[in-house]
Amino acid sequence: MSGVVPRQEPTLADVPGMGSPVPPPAMDKPQGPWKTAGKRFVRNPYAMGGLAVLLFFAIVAILAPVIAPYEPDKIDFMNTNLPPGTKGYPLGTDELGRDIFSRLVYSSQISLMVGFSVAAAAVLIGSLVGAVAGYFGGWIDTVLMRLVDVMNSLPSLFLNILVLSIFGSDFIYMVLVLSFTGWMGVARLVRGTFLQLREMQYVEAARATGVSSWGIMFRHLLRNSSHPIIVNATLMVGSAILSESALSYLGLGIQAPETSWGLMLSNAQEFMLVDPLQALYPGLCILIIVLAVNFIGDGIQDALNPREKKTFSARRLRQWRNKYSKSTG
């Protein structure tokens, strides 16, 4: 009996066509919220169109010395008020013989710098004030929110005119005064978000592990409230460009030899009946860039809002149709 081989049970390897068991397929890593929002933003035609326009103006502003054929303050009294299409002057000249196209190109630098600088400064101030008020609460919240109420009660245009009249209309003063009168909305937004987030369980866990209050505010709460801040900052760029244009139009903004779209509008108002195109060009640039920035802001808001089911285009077109369509009744 010593030569008898014990019987073995068949395995999958012994079955023809069957090898070792195939491991289960690896699960794909779920997409993060930022990647998902990026895909939603890319699928938004209005937001992508606005982004393309903004990038175009940014490239023009950066390459202004290369694109512009003349210096923006070059005066030529032999070629004043030339019509568009004149050789060497595609958009004509103004009353001092300055090339309008070159002035438009160089004006994009000032307008974009003011817009983004004011938005960044206002978001920084408003986020800090709103974070402190929303996290600590109590008398700190009361004092800071009453400060916001006082700032909101002041007429911003009058305050801007007063400050620029006293200190001058340099670029740095314009950025400071526009930032000083534009941070209150961000502060209220951040405060409301912090009031909700400070009661979350992960905040309690961070406190239990010894994380400081400032660490919780900036490493946890501010990061989780970044979505509305980004949307608000995007929309503030267009508002700052409009404010700069209004102040320059009133003669309190950018002064010669520098140029901006608002200053070009101010200079062109005396020649509206003679050459209205001098005002059309800078006004059209302001309109296009502000619309582009607003489209980007709306696109970011829709992309970061997971509850938004409809696309931006359908929602926006429906709003415009309801607002401007004539009643058929």
Image: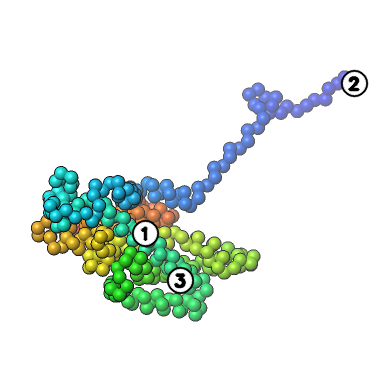
Residue 9, relative to residue 319: is it above or below? above
Reply above or below: 77 against 217. above
Q: Are marks 3 and 2 in contact (CB under 8 Å)?
A: no
Q: Nearer the viewer, mark 1 or mark 3?
A: 1
Q: Is residue 117 left or right of residue 14?
A: left
For label 1, the SS is helix
Q: Amino acid at mark 2?
A: Met
Instruction: Using the rendered image of the protein, determine whether residue 322 is visible from the camera's viewpoint.
Output: no
Towards the viewer: 298 or 223: 223
Which of disc 2 and disc 3 is earlier in sequence?
2
Identify the secondary structure beneath mark 2: loop
- Quarter of the image where the N terminus is located: top right
Q: Is tag 1's residue or tag 3's residue first in the polypeptide sequence?
A: 1
User: Which mark is nearer the camera, 3 or 2?
Assistant: 3
| Residue at image coords 20%, 61% | 265
Which residue appears at 40% of the width and 49% of the height?
A: 40
Percent of width and height locating residue 129: 45, 71
From this view, report whether residue 74 is shown above or below residue 154.
above
Residue 274: percent from left, percent from top? 9, 58
Mark 2 crowd level (few <14, some 14–19, many ≥20, 10 Å Cα): few
Q: For the residues marked 2 and 1, what is the alpha-carbon distance in whole angstroms?
A: 94 Å
Crowding at dot 1, Cα within 10 Å, few <14 / some 14-19 / many 20+, comes out as some
- Image location of residue 232, percent across then percent down: 38, 62
Q: Amino acid type of disc 1? A: Phe
**At 53% from the left edge and 68% from the top edge, which residue is drawn?**
198
| Amino acid at dot 3 | Val
Q: Which residue is mark 2?
A: 1
Foreground of the two, 110 or 47:
110
Task: State the SS at label 3.
Answer: helix
Q: Look at mark 3 in the image and give the residue it sits on.
A: 129
Would you name the residue on which mark 1 appears? 116
Dot 2 or dot 1, earlier in sequence:
2
